[in-house]
Structures are given as C-alpha cells and as structure tokens.
Image (cartoon, rainbow, N blue to C red):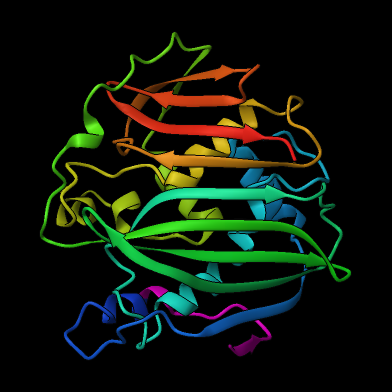
Amino acid sequence: MAVVELDRNPRGLYLRAALGLLPGRRGDDLPDREVVRRGVTVDRDHLARYDRVCGFRLTDTLPATYPHVLAFPLAMSLMAAPDFPFPVVGLVHVANRITVERPIDAGEPLDLMVRAERLRPHDRGRVFDVVATAFASGEQVWTGFSTYLSKTGAKSDGSGKRDQPAAPAPTARWRVTPRVGTDYAAVSGDHNPIHTSRIGARLFGFPRPIAHGMWSKARCLAALEGRLPARYTVDVAFKQPILLPATVGFSFAGTAGSFRLDGRRPHLAGQVTPP
C-alpha cells in the first residue's frame, strides 16, 4: 500500500469534491493508498467549541467522536482524489463504528492514518469503509470505520423498512435547531451544503438542510457521559435524516447498551459494547 504523508491539513477540499462531479475517467477500485499525518495536536479552543456544539462536558479527555473530526481532512483528501471511484459529493454516510482503546488526553500528539477498503455491493448501489486510526506514542488508541453508500438508480425493495419496532418512550427530548448544521460544519470541517444550505439540500432531494450524522452520534454519546467504560466500541446505523429544525427523542437501554434517536421516523440506532 502506498503511503502519502501530509505535514498539514489539505485545503480546498470541497472545491476538489465539487470538481469531482464533472464527467471524467475514474478508477474502478478503491485506491491502494493510506494518507498519514503525524504529530497532530489538539487546539483546546476548538475542542471546547466542539464540546459545546455536541453537548459534551468541557474536559481534557477527548470525546470518542473527536478523533473522527481530526481525521476528516485526511479522509476527504483520499475521497476527493481523481482516482477515487465515486464523487465524494453525494455519498451517503450510512454507518459508523468507533473503538476507544483507552481515554485520550487532549495534550497527547496523535499520528493519524486513513485508508479505504471493502468495496462491496449494496441493494441501493455500492458501499465501502473509510478506516481511520489514531496512535499516541506508538500505541493504537482509537479506530473509526465510516461506511459510505454510493447510490445507483436502483431502489431498494423496501424489505428493510418492514416490521419496524415501535420507538421506545424517550428518556430525553431535544430541539435540533437549524444552527446545528452550520455550527457543526464550522467545528467539523464538513461543509457539505446539504447541512448548511436550503438550496444545497434541495439539489440532493431534501426539502431543507439535514443534521450531520456524526453530530447525532456525538450528541447521543454526550448524553451517556459518565456511563461509558474506559474501553468500548460504539456502532451506529444512520436511518432517516433529521430535517432541520426538528424535535427528536433519545432513549437508552442501559442493560443492553443500545440507544436510539427517533422523531416521526427513526433517525439513528446505536450499540455500546465493552471489550
């Protein structure tokens, strides 16, 4: 596997992503390439802004979802490259798995590595995983798997939507304002217009902007602070998007480790698994 070392976060990624919508020759397979950036340090002010947007307490321990934000520019650099098989604009984030090997202190420099793997068929197109890993002093401390769908013209037969269990009674209700889209874009670097612009959302079939999936995961984990072990894996499946503004209900089954986010339709289903 080829390794591309970066000494700073790349710029102009969304311009490159937009150019990827133009017709042109693309690769047939995922690139055999890993993007690496070493010695990444955390900006405490940025971490505090992220914590506030997502609902975390202000501490020196990184939220489980924060390394995803640090690795996001590397993932975008990989997916916005001309040889990537799909335009990054239009990809749908359908699932995310994070494994926290131990708590990460905000003062620890991190080495980040990102690659794409496991291109496979899906009933609505093709899916693949973007894998990000974080190392501190040579020790792997965090791993994230983001599964993306590239949709084709074919539609699902709807079998996955049948016999949906009723949503449990929520333990909390949250009002999700339109600012969630713009505020999370500012702290995450994910400026996809489906989250920040009514026009941009309509271009991709949404009547109004939608919340970032990783914001919804982070907000759920913020609600579980103090109840999570030092080491764990947290899986989520992103269901129907949250159209902004919205009121959503959060529920958590403590003994099973499962949690949900529901509105009129299910938005997210998650599972916390200890090692």
* Residue at the spot 64% in from the left edge and 85% down from the top edge: 6
Q: Is residue 202 left or right of residue 37?
A: left
Q: Position of residue 246 (x, y in %)?
A: 33, 27
Q: Position of residue 259 (x, y in %)?
A: 53, 25
Residue at x 85% of width, y 52% of height: 105
Residue 54 position by quadrant: top right
Q: Residue at image x 65%, y 73%? A: 113
Q: Residue at x 11, y 56 (%)?
A: 154
For residue 143, above or below residue 222: below
Q: Which residues are magenta?
A: 1-14
Residue 246, relative to residue 8: is it above or below? above
53 left or right, relative to 183: right
- View extreme (top): residue: 169
- Nearer-the-camera pick, 186 or 194: 194
Report if residue 216 lies within the magenta region: no
Based on the displayed image, in which of its 4 quarters is residue 87 positioned?
bottom left
Q: Which image quarter is the C terminus in?
A: top right
Question: Looking at the rendering, in which quadrant would you find the N terminus?
Answer: bottom right
Is residue 4 one of those drawn in magenta?
yes
Is residue 5 something one can see in this rendering?
yes
Image spot of residue 218 (x, y percent): 57, 40
Residue 130 rendering spot, x and y as whole percentages: 50, 65
Q: Is residue 133 left or right of residue 270?
A: right
